[in-house]
């Protein structure tokens, strides 16, 4: 995917950032596919006012496993979203966390490859956990709990790391970036975009300014406009 959204546990606005990126790109005239690959708490459907009875991404992965996934088939399972100045499509996420086995890395990789045939830009909303299940590394056929997140990050051109700008959120973001470096080394080479959200006027305890400075020295910053 062209853009992948990542954030540690408790990060505010992770799905909002992904949805706004998709909306702004669609408003600029690009064809966009938004993919909810969060296997712990998929929320794109709810945030956009969609019924989450069926998971478009799970349907696409099943078609990929069966060798029946084409660009046309992907368009059929992706839901169109109309905004004031454009339209984009969404592959909604799994409705329960215990369905994570439906998002195998190989199938998701094929879905994202096919997505390039139907969209100019693919935006992926991922989960927070980057644990790689090292004990299963010898068995390539075994499903991995965080395969959807890891595979999305491996294929991403740009990674947006989102965290809260307070004494709890900043250390979490620092650790998440370190985990990203270890789990997906090439993502670190592309230098992920990073931006704290949810700033507070006053934060009790030690100031987080030093930690923010460390993040600023590692990552580029980009102000993200909201859908108007």
Image (cartoon, helix red, strand yellow):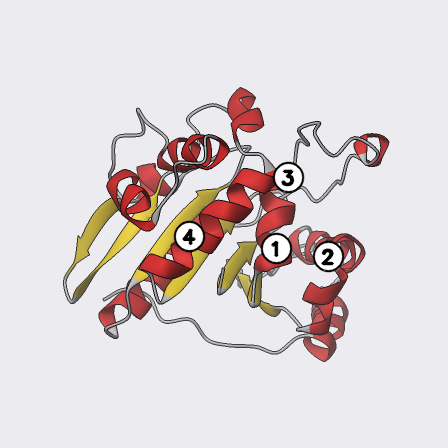
The residue beneath circle 3 is: 147
From the viewer's side, name the closer residue of 40 and 11.
40
Could you give the CA–CA distance between mark 2 and mark 3, rounded to whole angstroms? 12 Å
Q: Are marks 1 and 2 in contact (CB under 8 Å)?
A: yes
Relative to residue 50, is residue 187 drawn left or right? right
Q: Position of residue 27 (x, y in %)?
A: 23, 69
Could you give the CA–CA distance between mark 4 and mark 3, rounded to whole angstroms? 18 Å
The residue beneath circle 4 is: 114
From the viewer's side, name the closer residue of 30 and 195.
30
Q: Nearer the viewer, mark 2 or mark 4?
A: 4
Of pointers 2 and 3, the one earlier in the residue sequence: 3
Q: Dot 3, how many residues are within 10 Å of its Cα: few (below 14), some (14-19), or many (20+)?
A: many
Could you give the CA–CA distance between mark 1 and mark 2, rounded to whole angstroms? 7 Å
Of pointers 3 and 1, the one earlier in the residue sequence: 3
Q: Quadrant of residue 104?
A: top right
Q: Nearer the viewer, mark 4 or mark 1?
A: 4
The residue beneath circle 1 is: 153
Could you give the CA–CA distance between mark 4 and mark 1, rounded to whole angstroms? 17 Å
Give SS at disc 4.
helix
Of pointers 1 and 2, the one earlier in the residue sequence: 1
Q: Residue furthest top?
A: 98
Q: Position of residue 57 (x, y in %)?
A: 41, 37
The residue beneath circle 2 is: 184
Relative to residue 50, is residue 215 drawn left or right? right
């Amino acid at each position: 995917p062209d853009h992948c959204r990542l954030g540690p546990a408790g990060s505010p606005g992770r799905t909002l950032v992904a949805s706004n990126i998709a909306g702004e790109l669609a408003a600029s005239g690009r064809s966009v596919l938004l993919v909810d690959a969060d296997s712990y708490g998929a929320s794109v459907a709810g945030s956009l006012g969609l019924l989450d009875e069926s998971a478009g991404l799970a349907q696409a992965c099943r078609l990929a496993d069966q060798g029946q996934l084409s660009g046309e088939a992907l368009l059929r399972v992706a839901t169109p979203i109309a905004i004031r100045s454009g339209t984009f499509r969404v592959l909604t996420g799994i409705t329960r966390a215990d369905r994570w086995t439906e998002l195998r890395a190989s199938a998701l990789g094929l879905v994202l490859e096919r997505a390039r045939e139907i969209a100019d830009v693919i935006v992926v909303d991922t989960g927070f956990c980057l644990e790689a299940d090292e004990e299963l590394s010898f068995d390539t056929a075994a499903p991995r709990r965080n395969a959807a997140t890891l595979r999305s990050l491996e294929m991403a051109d740009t990674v947006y790391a989102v965290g809260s700008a307070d004494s709890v959120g900043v250390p979490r973001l620092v650790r998440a970036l370190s985990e990203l470096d270890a789990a997906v080394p090439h993502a670190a080479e592309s230098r992920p975009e990073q931006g704290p959200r949810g700033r507070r006027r006053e934060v009790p305890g030690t100031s987080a300014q030093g930690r923010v400075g460390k993040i600023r020295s590692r990552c580029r910053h980009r102000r993200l406009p909201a859908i108007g």
